[in-house]
Image (cartoon, rainbow, N blue to C red):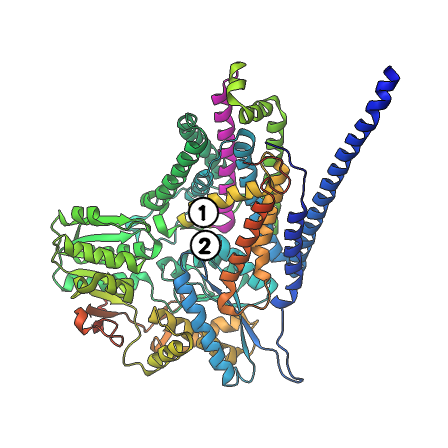
C-alpha cells in the first residue's frame, strides 16, 4: 500500500514543485530583466556625462538610506509613518548649524550661533539628536495604531517643518543656512563629487548591513510577528511597545544620518527641503520597491531617482513646457506602477 | 497578506519604457540644429528656472520672456551670424533639484553660461558649484542679500532685498512713522524684505512695536492683525509672498477698523492683490519693481509679450529675464565663444546696458546690479485703476541713504 500511496502522491508533488519552480524562475527572470534595464539606464547616464551620473548617484544614495530606514518601520513593523522627513531635517539642520560659520550674514541683527565644527564631529550629534527626539515622540506614538498613527506622524512632519521655518534664531528661518562643511579629516577634504559619492555609498552600505542584521535577527522576527498580529505576540510575553520604540529610534537615527549627508552634499539647507511632500515621495518609494524588503527599498530608490532624472532627457519638447512634461510623465508612471504592482517591484505584501 | 504570483511584467514594461526614453533621447540633449554647409554651430546657453513647484509663476514668465528674446535675436540674424540656443532645465525652486539640473546642464549639455534661477534658495544651492567650476550663473529674479557674496561668476539684474528695505525704511521715516507693526509671510523673500526694512527703520530711530509672521497656507489673518493693532502702531508694514495673501490682509486690516497707512512691496500691488483688496487698498504705498512708463523699450517688450502669449504678469520680472538674454548675447558677441566663461565674466564687469528694466545699468565687483532703482507708488481708487496704470500712480524713485 505504501508504494501505491507513494506512486499516487508523487506526480502531484512533482507537479506542485515544478509549478513553484516555474513561478520562481519566472520571478527571477523578471527581476534580472529589471536589473538589466536599471544597469542599462545607469550606463546611459554615465555615457551622457560622468559628473551628472555622480550627482544622480549621490541623490540615490541619500534617498536609499532614507527608504531603507523607513522600510524598517513601515514594512517590518506595519506602522505607516509619514513623518520621516522630520528626522531627515533634524540631522541636516544639526550638521548645518554646527559646521557653518555663517560669515555670509550681512545683517548682524539676526545672526545665528556659529560653532564651526568639522563635519565628522557634527554628524554623530545629528544622528543622536534624531534618536533622542525619536524616543521622545515614539513614547507618545506607541499608544496609537493604524490610521491614527498616520495622522500623528503627519503632525510630526508639519511641526518639524514649522520649527525649521520659524525658529529664526537657530535656523535662519526661510533664508536657510549655507557654507556647510564637507567631510574632512586633517588636511584631507572630500571636496570632489566622486569622493563624496563613494563616501555616501559607503554609509549606505553600512545602513543596509545594519538593517539586514536587524531583520534577520530574532529581534527582526519579533517585529515581523508584530506586523502580522500584535496581540498574539504580546500574549507570549513580548513587550511589543519596546520593540516598536527600538526600531522606530534606529530608523530615525538612520534618517538623521541621511540628513547630515544631504546638508554636507548641497552645502545649503532651507526649510523647503523638508516639506511633507518629501515624506510622501519617500513612502511612495518604499511601496514602489516593496514592503519588508531591503533589496526592494534599494531598487525602489534607484528606480525613482532614475525615473525622475531620466525624464530630463524627454525629447522634442518646446522649451516652455520642459518642467511640466517631466513631472506629468513621472506621475503617470508611478500611478501605473501602483495600479499594476501594489506589492511593489520585489515585495510580497500589500499595505 | 495574500501572496500573489509575481507578475513583474508591468514593472518590466515601465522600466523598458524608461530605458527607451532615456536611450531615445540621448540625441535630443545634444542635438545640433541641421546646419547648411559652412555655417557655424549655434551659441548654446543654459537656463535654469522654477518651471514647477513654489516659484512656478516667476519661472514660467521668465522662460517665456527669454524664449521671446532668443527668437527675436535669431530672427534678426543671430549673434554675428550664429544662432542662439537655450537648453532649459527645471530647478523646481529647490536646492536639491537645482544641483541636479546644474549638473545636467554643465556635464551633459556642456554649457558654461547659465541664465537663472528665479528662486534664491536654488541659486544659493548651486552658487558654490558654479563658483568652483567657473560657470556663469546669471539671475534676473533672485533677490536674497546673501547672493551678493556668492562668488565671482554669480551675477543678477535683480535688486537685492537690502536696497528695497533701505528704501522702505527711509520712506516710512520720512512720512513721520515712528511706531511700526509688521506682518510677514515666512518665506525667504518676504522675510528678507521685512528684515532689511526693520533694520533701516530702527537705524533711523523708529521702533517696531509688534510683529507677526504667517505660513504660506494661512488664509485668515484677523487674529494676528488684531494683536498687531492692539499696540497702536503708526503704520502697518506688509511683506507677503503671494498676491492672494496680500489682498486678503489689506482687506481684513481695514475691516477690523485700522485706518492708518499701509506700506508694502511689489507683490502687494499686483493685479490680483488689488482686485481682492478693492477700495481698501486705496492710498497704500509700496516700493515696487515696475517697468517705467516712460521707457519705450519696456513698453515694446510688454506689447510683444502680450501679443505672443496673450497675457502679461509680473512685468518687471518679465523685462529682467528678457534683458538677461540680450546682455548674454552681447557678451557672446564680444567673446565669440560660449565656452569662455572667464571672458563672459570680464565682459559682465565692463558692460553698461540699457534695456527694458532701465537705462545705463551695470554690475559692481560683487556682480550686483547698479543704476536701477525701485519706484515708490501709491494705489489709486478702484474707479481710476486701468490696465495702463496698473492701479497706481508713480511718486518717484525710492529714497536712498
Quadrant including the C terminus of chain A: top right
Q: Residue at x 77, y 38 (%)?
A: A22
Q: Is residue B91 above or below residue A210?
A: below
- Considering depth in this image, is B225 or B98 the residue closer to the camera? B225
Q: What predominant SS class does the magenta segment belong to?
A: helix
User: Residue at label 1?
Assistant: A277
Instruction: Left or right? Give the position of A120 relative to B318.
Output: right
Number of other residues with Cα within 10 Å of mark 1, as a class: few under 14, some 14 to 19, many 20 or more:
some
Q: Secondary structure at mark 2?
A: loop
Tag 1 and tag 2 share a subunit: no
Q: Residue A303: percent from the left, percent from the top?
A: 61, 48
Q: Chain of mark 2?
A: B
> In which image quadrant can residue B27 be found?
bottom right
Quarter the N terminus of chain A occupies: top right
Mark linked to residue A198: none
Seen from the viewer's position, the closer of residues B18 and A50 is B18
The residue pinned by badge 2 equals B94
Q: Is residue A254 magenta?
A: yes
Give B251 or B198, whichever is nearer the viewer: B251
How many labels, in total? Answer: 2
B308 sits to left or right of B3: left
Residue B360 at x, y = what percent?
Answer: 35, 79
Does residue B169 appear in this view?
no
Give the magenta-colored segment's residue range.
Answer: A238-267
Residue ID at (76%, 35%)? A19
Q: Is residue B226 shown to the viewer in this render?
A: yes
- The one of A327 and B268 positioned closer to us in this rendering: A327
Amino acid at each position: 500500500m505504501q508504494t501505491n500511496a507513494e506512486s499516487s502522491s508523487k506526480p502531484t508533488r512533482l507537479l506542485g514543485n515544478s509549478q513553484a519552480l516555474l513561478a520562481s524562475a519566472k520571478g527571477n527572470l523578471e527581476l534580472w530583466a529589471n536589473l538589466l534595464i536599471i544597469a542599462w539606464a545607469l550606463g546611459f547616464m554615465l555615457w551622457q556625462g560622468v559628473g551628472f551620473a555622480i550627482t544622480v548617484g549621490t541623490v540615490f544614495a541619500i534617498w536609499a538610506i532614507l527608504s531603507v530606514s523607513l522600510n524598517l518601520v513601515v514594512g517590518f513593523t506595519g506602522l505607516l509613518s509619514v513623518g520621516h522627513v522630520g528626522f531627515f531635517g533634524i540631522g541636516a539642520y544639526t550638521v548645518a548649524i554646527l559646521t557653518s560659520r555663517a560669515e555670509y550674514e550681512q545683517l548682524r541683527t539676526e545672526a545665528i550661533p556659529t560653532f564651526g565644527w568639522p563635519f565628522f564631529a557634527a554628524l554623530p550629534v545629528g544622528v543622536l539628536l534624531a534618536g533622542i527626539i525619536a524616543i521622545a515622540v515614539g513614547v507618545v506614538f506607541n499608544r496609537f495604531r493604524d490610521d491614527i498613527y498616520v495622522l500623528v506622524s503627519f503632525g510630526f512632519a508639519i511641526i518639524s517643518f514649522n520649527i525649521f521655518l520659524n525658529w529664526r534664531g537657530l535656523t535662519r528661518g526661510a533664508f536657510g543656512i549655507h557654507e556647510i562643511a564637507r567631510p574632512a579629516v586633517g588636511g584631507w577634504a572630500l571636496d570632489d563629487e566622486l569622493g563624496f559619492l563613494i563616501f555616501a555609498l559607503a554609509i549606505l552600505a553600512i545602513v543596509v548591513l545594519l538593517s539586514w542584521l536587524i531583520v534577520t535577527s530574532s529581534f527582526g522576527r519579533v517585529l515581523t510577528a508584530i506586523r502580522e498580529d500584535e496581540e498574539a505576540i504580546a500574549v507570549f510575553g513580548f513587550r511589543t511597545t519596546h520593540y516598536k520604540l527600538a526600531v522606530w529610534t534606529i530608523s530615525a537615527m538612520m534618517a538623521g544620518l541621511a540628513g547630515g549627508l544631504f546638508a554636507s552634499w548641497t552645502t545649503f539647507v532651507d526649510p523647503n527641503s523638508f516639506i511633507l511632500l518629501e515624506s510622501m515621495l519617500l513612502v511612495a518609494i518604499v511601496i514602489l520597491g516593496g514592503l519588508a524588503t531591503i533589496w526592494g527599498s534599494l531598487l525602489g530608490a534607484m528606480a525613482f531617482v532614475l525615473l525622475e532624472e531620466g525624464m530630463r532627457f524627454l525629447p522634442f519638447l518646446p522649451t516652455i513646457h520642459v518642467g511640466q512634461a517631466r513631472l506629468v510623465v513621472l506621475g503617470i508612471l508611478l500611478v501605473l506602477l501602483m495600479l499594476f504592482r501594489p506589492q511593489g517591484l520585489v515585495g510580497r505584501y500589500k499595505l | 497578506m495574500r501572496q500573489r504570483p509575481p507578475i513583474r511584467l508591468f514593472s518590466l514594461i515601465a522600466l523598458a519604457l524608461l530605458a527607451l526614453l532615456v536611450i531615445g533621447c540621448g540625441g535630443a540633449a545634444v542635438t545640433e540644429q541641421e546646419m547648411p554647409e559652412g555655417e557655424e554651430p549655434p551659441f548654446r546657453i543654459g537656463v535654469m528656472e522654477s518651471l514647477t513647484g513654489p516659484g512656478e509663476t516667476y519661472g514660467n514668465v521668465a522662460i517665456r520672456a527669454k524664449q521671446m528674446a532668443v527668437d527675436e535675436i535669431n530672427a534678426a540674424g543671430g549673434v554675428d551670424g550664429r544662432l542662439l540656443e537655450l537648453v532649459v532645465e527645471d530647478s523646481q525652486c529647490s536646492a536639491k533639484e537645482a544641483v541636479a539640473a546644474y549638473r545636467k546642464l554643465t556635464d551633459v549639455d556642456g554649457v558654461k553660461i547659465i541664465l537663472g534661477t528665479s528662486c534664491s534658495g536654488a541659486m544659493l544651492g548651486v552658487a558654490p558649484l558654479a563658483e568652483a567650476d567657473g560657470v556663469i550663473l546669471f539671475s534676473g529674479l533672485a533677490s536674497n542679500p546673501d547672493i551678493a557674496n556668492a562668488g565671482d561668476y554669480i551675477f543678477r539684474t535683480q535688486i537685492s532685498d537690502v536696497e528695497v528695505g533701505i528704501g522702505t525704511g527711509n520712506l516710512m521715516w520720512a512720512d513721520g512713522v515712528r511706531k511700526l507693526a509688521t506682518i510677514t509671510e515666512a518665506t525667504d523673500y518676504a522675510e528678507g524684505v521685512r528684515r532689511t526694512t526693520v533694520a533701516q527703520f530702527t537705524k533711523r530711530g523708529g521702533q517696531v512695536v509688534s510683529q507677526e509672521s504667517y505660513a504660506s497656507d494661512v488664509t485668515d489673518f484677523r487674529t494676528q492683525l488684531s494683536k498687531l493693532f492692539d499696540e497702536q502702531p503708526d503704520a502697518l508694514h506688509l511683506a507677503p509672498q503671494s498676491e492672494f495673501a496680500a489682498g486678503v490682509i489689506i482687506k481684513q486690516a481695514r475691516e477690523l477698523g485700522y485706518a492708518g497707512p499701509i506700506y508694502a512691496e511689489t507683490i502687494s500691488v499686483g493685479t490680483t492683490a488689488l482686485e481682492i483688496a478693492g477700495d481698501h487698498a486705496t492710498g497704500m504705498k509700496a516700493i515696487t519693481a515696475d517697468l517705467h512708463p516712460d521707457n519705450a523699450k519696456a513698453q515694446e517688450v510688454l506689447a510683444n509679450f502680450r501679443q505672443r502669449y496673450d497675457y502679461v504678469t509680473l512685468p518687471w520680472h518679465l523685462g529682467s529675464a528678457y534683458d538677461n538674454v540680450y546682455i548674454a548675447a552681447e557678451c557672446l558677441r564680444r567673446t565669440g565663444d560660449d565656452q569662455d566663461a572667464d571672458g563672459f565674466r570680464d565682459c559682465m564687469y565692463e558692460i553698461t546696458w540699457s534695456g527694458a528694466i532701465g537705462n545705463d545699468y551695470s554690475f559692481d565687483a560683487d556682480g550686483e546690479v547698479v543704476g536701477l532703482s525701485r519706484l515708490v507708488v501709491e494705489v489709486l481708487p478702484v474707479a481710476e485703476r486701468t490696465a495702463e496704470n496698473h492701479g497706481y500712480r508713480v511718486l518717484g524713485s525710492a529714497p536712498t541713504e
